[in-house]
Amino acid sequence: MTQKERMEAGLVYDPLDKEIMEDQAQGVELMYEFNMSHPGEAGKRARLLKRMLGTIGEGCCIEPPLRANWGGRHLHLGDNVYVNFNLTIVDDTDIFIGDKVMIGPNVTIATANHPISPQLRARSLQYNRSVRIGANVWIGAGAIIVPGVTIGDNTVIGAGSVVTRDIPADVVAAGNPCRVLREIGEREREYFYKNERIDWENLSHL
């Protein structure tokens, strides 16, 4: 079994293997071109993202710079995903992001992990676990999502949170480690911020 086959099977492997490094370099070159593009080059950015990412839906936007050690090769976006500045992804395996997800600035999503064994870490070995983010999720600025985590649909992850375990759908969660604060319910249909009411009658046309 090659090191790349071990990587794809979720086993401990050597990320410095020549075949892996050469494959990885292709995506990083495209990412560099994306990050160096001018703000007015929306068409160029869209074309590059289609080449860079594993899959990308309609109406997606990623604000440069994007940092990804595979250049986004294992990133899969649904439709209408918005990613603010300076997303860092350790995309050694798949990151699945659903429709209408919003990601704040300076968010980190990691899939690579290193064994606790000092002997294995001394050899720079690692293994990977996928991350899954459901539809209509909002991830606040500076959040960190670690390998193997799943976040359910409609959930809000507070700014600066460190998400170390699965978070269910339809909740507000925050903290380090990130934990559920409350379910999203009737109050969120009436208020948009603290005690400030939503003026639904003026939003019907939006």
Image (tube, helix red, strand yellow):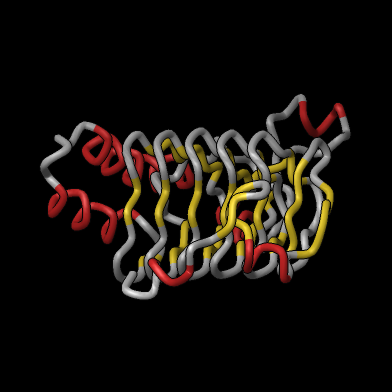
Residue 61: percent from left, percent from top: 32, 54
Instruction: Give coordinates of residue 156: x percent, y percent.
Output: 65, 55
What residue do we see at 44% from left, 45% from top?
A: 70
Does residue 94 appear in this view?
no
Q: Most extreme residue toward the right, as rendered?
A: 117
Between 135 and 189, the residue placed more toward the observer is 189
Is 72 left or right of 146, judged from the image as shown? left
At x 39%, y 68%, the residue is 203
Q: Quadrant of residue 116?
A: top right
Observer-nearest of 31 and 21: 31
Residue 184 location (% of width, % of height):
73, 65
Question: Is 141 drawn above or below residue 166 in the view shown?
Answer: above
Q: Is residue 49 something one can see in this rendering?
A: yes
Q: Which quadrant would residue 29 be assigned to in this image?
A: top left
Residue shown at the point (56%, 37%) measured from the top left: 141
Rendered-image quadrant of the C terminus: bottom left
